């Protein structure tokens, strides 16, 4: 049965906006017959639905630029300043990327699991158990709380401060709406400027303090290590810009990633049984399948540098492309039974949820660790945990960043 | 062309070339656990392999991108390479590699 809003949108000119707030996959399937690339009138851009096409575009930055390479100053300001990694290109981008990768090497991430992720998860789990009600919303009370606290701890901010964490989450949800809209209207840009300033104001006291009193945290490492990478002229504004993308990547995207893997485990009995039995390979593969099936970032923008042909369709220079990961990750040309969660897929991590290419996510090792450890903590601590049939059921709402929420669960409490 | 790969647990796999355009893709398409996070752009260092010393000298030299990125790999050795930068080539038939630590996803 098609959703009534979905039925209404079939027959209308195609737009990804037609499936805002409703599950989008049937709509994309209906569209695939028109080929892997379709014009979106409302977004004024080509939507790319094919896996190979999306991967090719992301891998070839010399032909398809990230739109941030040519943006007005107002967007630079919304993104926190010109040294934000997303705004850099060429050799400057690679240098910044190497610096970020140095903060995120696999052995360091293993340390973050023990020192930042585990204490966060333990604290949240204790709170849920202390309620003694046998009920919880695993989004608001658990999954949503993990990434902002972990990234706050890594940046050297007080991660146990509930009010600060709520503010981090709220501001990053708001800035993601601005980004997802493509900075479309003056109102949206004004909102972006306000939110951007609020986020900068949260970071600034710590950035100023660590300049004088370096510690073992990301902000201090930016002050001490970035100058040798980028020259001695590193200003406070530069440090803000560098930290902003870590803050954003750390705080928001992983929130949706955790909700989606928890949803998969709670709603798919086979996956759950496999994960209960095997916390290594089966859990890792389940996380990849949840990223492929549900993702958290539904699409990325790119721009054609020249006239070109993509899958037989002519694309003009400077036209925008929406790389629709939420469709491409279920491309039947790439995946057998694309809508099914299948832990036997090889290779499990061959999807677009973290992008391919020179701008692929540098935080994916940390994100994966948070997602896996969140699932393990739920299965280990909440006996017989299941969705609460009497509470609001999860929905896949919103447009750009999406996850299944709320996750109201019940579990058995010892008497 | 085929290659011999020892995975992170030391298990030996013999892998045939197929349509892969790099050694990383051969390893990945065979289903071994290799993160290869950036998909082959010399931009992540998670496709790091140790090349058998017998073979190391026969490989084409590193490009600038690979050289800069490989420093970020875990436990680099004199025989370290990024497998996404190695092209399948009949001259490399029988190449022997070991997946380095930090490459599993
Ligand atoms: C499930 C969680 C996550 C998802 C789905 C995700 C997704 C992505 C995607 C799709 C991109 C590519 C953006 C583009 O089009 O250029 C990206 C880049 C990036 N991500 Fe993540 N991310 C996640 C977690 C994280 C975390 C935890 C961090 C840091 C703590 C992080 C930091 C970054 C940074 C710095 C970049 C820019 C890389 C560059 O430009 O070279 N991400 N991420
Ligand atoms: S796959 Fe990223 S460097 Fe080789």
Image: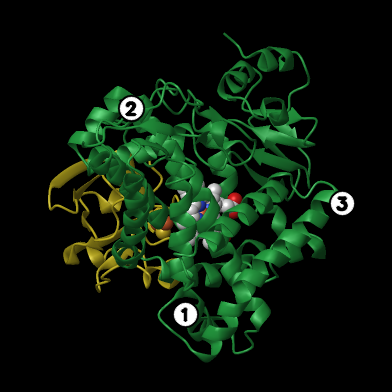
In whole angstroms, how far apart are the C-alphas of marks 3 and 1? 36 Å
Residue B26: image location, x then y, percent = 32, 44
Are the numbered discs 2 and 3 placed on the same chain, yes or no?
A: yes
Locate the C terminus of chain A by quadrant.
top left
Chain in green in the render: A
In whole angstroms, how far apart are the C-alphas of marks 2 and 3? 44 Å
Q: Is residue A128 above or below residue B8?
A: above
Locate the N terminus of chain A by quadrant.
top right
A148 displayed left or right of B28: right
Q: Secondary structure at mark 2?
A: loop
B94 displayed left or right of B21: left
Q: Is residue A362 visible?
A: no
Chain in yellow in the render: B
Residue A221: which disc? 1
Q: Chain of mark 2?
A: A
- The residue where tag 3 is placed is A186
A194 displayed left or right of A169: right
- The residue where tag 2 is placed is A342
Q: Secondary structure at mark 3?
A: helix
Mark 1: few, some, or many residues within 10 Å (few <14, many ≥20)?
A: some
Looking at the image, tell me whether mark 2 or mark 3 is earlier in sequence order: 3
Residue A175: image location, x then y, percent = 68, 53
Q: Is mark 3 within 8 Å of ligand 1?
A: no
A35 displayed left or right of A262: right
Residue A191: which disc? none
State which quadrant residue A102 falls in: bottom left
Q: Residue furthest right?
A: A186
Q: Residue at x 60, y 77 (%)?
A: A239
Q: Is residue A396 visible?
A: yes
């Amino acid at each position: 049965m098609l959703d009534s809003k979905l039925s209404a949108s079939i027959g209308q000119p195609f737009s990804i906006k037609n499936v805002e707030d409703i599950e989008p996959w049937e709509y994309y399937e209906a569209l695939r017959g028109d080929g892997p690339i379709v014009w979106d009138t409302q977004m004024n851009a080509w939507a790319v639905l094919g896996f190979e096409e999306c991967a090719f575009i992301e891998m070839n930055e010399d032909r398809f630029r990230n739109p941030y390479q040519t943006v007005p100053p107002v967007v630079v300001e919304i993104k926190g300043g010109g040294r934000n990694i997303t705004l850099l290109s060429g050799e400057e981008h690679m240098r910044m990327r190497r610096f970020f990768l140095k903060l995120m090497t696999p052995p360091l991430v293993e340390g973050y699991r023990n020192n930042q992720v585990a204490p966060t998860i333990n604290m949240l789990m204790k709170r849920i158990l202390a309620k003694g009600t046998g009920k919880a919303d695993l989004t608001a009370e658990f999954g949503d709380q993990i990434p902002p606290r972990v990234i706050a701890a890594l940046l050297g901010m007080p991660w146990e401060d509930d009010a600060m964490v709520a503010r981090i989450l709220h501001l990053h949800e708001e800035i993601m709406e601005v980004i997802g809209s493509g900075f479309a209207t003056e109102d949206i840009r004004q909102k972006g400027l306000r939110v951007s300033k609020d986020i900068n104001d949260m970071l600034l006291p710590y950035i100023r303090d660590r300049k004088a009193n370096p510690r073992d945290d990301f902000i201090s490492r930016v002050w001490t290590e970035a100058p040798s990478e980028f020259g001695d002229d590193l200003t406070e504004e530069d440090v803000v810009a560098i930290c902003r993308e870590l803050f954003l990547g750390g705080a928001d995207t992983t929130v949706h990633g955790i909700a989606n893997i928890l949803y998969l485990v709670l709603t798919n009995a086979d996956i759950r049984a496999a994960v209960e039995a095997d916390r290594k390979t089966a859990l890792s593969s389940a996380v990849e399948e949840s990223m492929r099936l549900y993702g958290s970032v539904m699409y990325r923008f790119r721009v054609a540098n020249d006239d070109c042909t993509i899958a037989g369709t002519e694309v003009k220079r400077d036209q925008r492309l929406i790389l629709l990961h939420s469709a491409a990750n279920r491309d039947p040309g790439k995946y057998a039974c694309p809508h099914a969660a299948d832990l036997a897929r090889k290779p499990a991590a061959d999807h677009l949820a973290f992008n391919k290419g020179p701008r692929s996510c540098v935080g994916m090792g940390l994100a994966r660790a948070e997602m896996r450890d969140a699932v393990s903590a739920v299965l280990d601590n909440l006996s017989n945990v299941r969705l609460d049939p009497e509470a609001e059921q999860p929905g896949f709402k919103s447009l750009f960043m999406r996850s299944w929420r709320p996750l109201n669960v019940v579990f058995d409490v010892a008497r | 062309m085929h290659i011999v790969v020892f995975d992170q647990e030391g298990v030996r796999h013999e892998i045939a070339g197929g349509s892969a355009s790099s050694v990383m893709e051969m390893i990945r398409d065979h289903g071994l656990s290799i993160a290869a996070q950036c998909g082959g752009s010399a931009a992540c260092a998670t496709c790091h392999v140790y090349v058998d010393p017998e073979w190391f000298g026969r490989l084409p030299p590193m490009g600038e991108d690979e050289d800069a990125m490989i420093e970020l790999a875990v436990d680099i050795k004199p025989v370290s390479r990024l497998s996404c930068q190695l092209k399948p080539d009949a001259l490399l038939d029988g190449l022997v590699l070991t997946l380095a630590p930090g490459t599993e996803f």
